[in-house]
Image (spheres, rainbow, N blue to C red):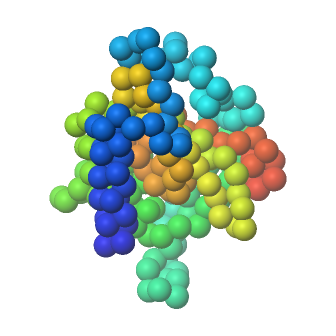
């Protein structure tokens, strides 16, 4: 949990610093000529295209097994149509995603709650999450944020992106190719 918090704090600092300084690093798209972008503008942005992606519903399940680090493990399920992708993750991630699904806050904020608070403070809205592909048995995701005329396209662990999207009410999409290759039929 401490590692997740340290990484989240570093990420928050980097993102906030870049946005406040006005830099456009790789992964940030800046649109000139407008004071802000709204959802109708998003349709014109190629990076946000949903072609080849399907919206996914999320569920989680705790597992009583303990992995070799001593942490509990669990599953995150992404459902789209009649297909389901299963992701193995830590008990902490499962709990955070469950809290996001239930709109529940713990006594102390998780790193995902902290990220959501920072985004809100800096006027950044989570647009959507895309679960894009798998390499070497590792899933990859993109987390898209908007602030004014800037869109930030962040590489993210899928479980982190999902936990943040759930807290923000942002939709989660999964690659149809990934669903076909890794998904199991559930109906």
Position of 110 with respect to 181 (left or right) is left
Identify the residue at horizontal 64%, vertical 58% (top origin).
139
Quarter holding the C terminus is top right
Position of 181 with respect to 113 (left or right) is right
Identify the residue at horizontal 62%, vertical 47% (top origin).
131
Give percent across and percent down for residue 112: 34, 53
Q: Is residue 174 visible from the viewing direction of this image?
A: yes
Give percent across and percent down for residue 72: 46, 77
Figure check: 35 above or below 25: above
Q: Residue furthest left?
A: 107
Q: Quadrant of residue 126?
A: top left
Figure check: 109 above or below 53: below
- Residue in front for this viewpoint, 13 or 40: 13
Identify the residue at horizontal 23%, vertical 56% (top origin).
109
Give percent across and percent down for residue 186: 74, 49
Identify the residue at horizontal 70%, vertical 67% (top origin).
137
Give percent across and percent down for residue 58: 54, 47
- Residue in front for this viewpoint, 90 or 103: 90
Quarter holding the N terminus is bottom left
């Amino acid at each position: 949990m401490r590692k997740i918090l340290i990484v989240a704090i570093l990420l928050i600092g980097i993102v906030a610093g870049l946005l406040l300084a006005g830099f456009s690093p790789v992964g940030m798209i800046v649109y000139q000529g407008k004071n802000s972008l709204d959802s109708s503008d998003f349709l014109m942005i190629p990076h946000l295209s949903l072609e080849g992606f399907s919206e996914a519903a999320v569920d989680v399940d705790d597992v009583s097994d303990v992995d070799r680090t001593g942490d509990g493990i669990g599953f995150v399920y992404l459902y789209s149509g009649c297909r389901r992708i299963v992701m193995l993750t830590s008990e902490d991630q499962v709990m955070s995603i469950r809290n996001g699904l239930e709109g529940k806050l713990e006594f102390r904020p998780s790193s995902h709650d902290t990220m959501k608070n920072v985004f809100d403070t800096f006027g950044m809205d989570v647009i959507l999450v895309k679960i894009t592909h798998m390499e070497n048995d590792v899933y990859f995701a993109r987390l898209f944020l908007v602030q004014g005329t800037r869109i930030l396209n962040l590489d993210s662990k899928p479980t982190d992106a999902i936990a943040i999207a759930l807290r923000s009410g942002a939709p989660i999409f999964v690659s149809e190719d990934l669903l076909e290759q890794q998904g199991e039929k559930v109906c």
